[in-house]
Amino acid sequence: MQLSRVIPSEPSRRGSAPAGLVFWALGLLVFAGPFACKGESDQPQWDAADATRKTEFVDDEDLVRDLPFAKDLASLAAFAAEEEWDLDGNLVDLVTGESEARYGWESRALLDSDSFVGWRLESGRRTYERECAGCHALNGDGGGPAAQYLFPRPRNFRKREFKFQSAPVGGRPRREDLMRTVTKGLVGSAMPAFRLLPEEKRHDVVEYVRYLSIRGEFEQTLLEWTDLDGEFADPDEVQELVEDRWERSNNPVTVPLIAETDFDQDSIERGRLLFTNAAACNGCHGDTGLGDGPTADSFRDAWGYPIRPRDLTTGQFRAGIDPSDIYRVIANGIGGTPMPGALGNNTPEEIWDLVHFVQHLTGKEVSR
């Protein structure tokens, strides 16, 4: 009997081609669609309304409104025109003109200024606009498109208040202070660490932040002095004052006047007594440091935003966890917040005792 060779028939491709096309189309829609359809609506909305921004005074009239500078300037200009102040022109034009002459990007005065490392500014601007402006805004006033979604809000560089710096509250941060914040970030906030950004780029962006801060302080001070006197302030005097405030020599680093004392049970107990009695830290932070003191719910920062005392038991401190970092915060206080400094009220030995009690609250144990 002759066996016939059976050749398997080729599987039919009929119907499979359309199915494949459907899957390819779905893949393109899911993965490539968002990029292909990207339009103006996907770009940062720099001028979008921010309902969370505190632009009105709250209960305490001493608080500074977080008012965008352009609105603040326009408001005073309208008032000056109504009151017929003796000005050599419109106040908006006067302020912006003086600012541009001194700090404009093409200004010769900026190129010749000793207040900046000029060759870093262009690179710093590009890096800042790419990495930082989404939160801190293009002009550094803390009102970027993402700001309304963040708590605490991004720092407003134009308002003279910086939380974590080497000098006491009221001073200005050094480049090293800003570099530390950019590099390490701020634990417990939306400010990330930029360790992966090349070091030179970080130095560049620090210089640009200083530029935004100094220019902003110049404009704000010029406006405030004009408002105070009812006549246009001397821009040369304002510039000299502001840039002098940022001079390194005028912002000395707060360092412990004595070496760290022994971290032992006696120091912890002395720190506890200070914390709960003489220094009255427990009024805000609570007896056990949980941030639940009797006044904990009543605080606002300098711009009117609610703020709570730190829960010290977490061990998450935005300025750093080293003993010297904790010492500096206790000694200097925190700018723009109700946290006062202990310098002048407590001895260096007492501040070290407070440091050791805070470390104890985080779970650090005395070595046996």
Image (cartoon, rainbow, N blue to C red):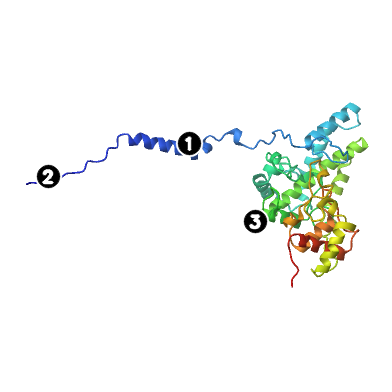
The image position of residue 9, as x and y in percent, is 22, 41
Which residue in the structure is indicated by mark 2? 4
| Residue situated furthest bottom in the rendering | 368
Q: Amino acid at mark 2?
A: Ser
Q: Which residue is mark 3?
A: 195
Give percent across and percent down for residue 232.
89, 37
Q: Earlier in the sequence, mark 3 or mark 2?
A: 2
Is residue 22 in view from this perspective?
Answer: yes
**Nearer the observer, 145 or 286:** 286
Residue name at image x 74 percent, y 60 percent: 362
| 219 sits to left or right of 38 | right
User: Picture coordinates of residue 206 (x, y %)?
Assistant: 72, 52
**For discs 3 and 2, the disc positioned in front in the rendered view:** 2
Tag 3: amino acid: Arg
What residue would you read off at disc 1? 29
Disc 3, SS = loop
Image height check: is 310 above or below 273?
above
Q: Is residue 30 above or below residue 195?
A: above
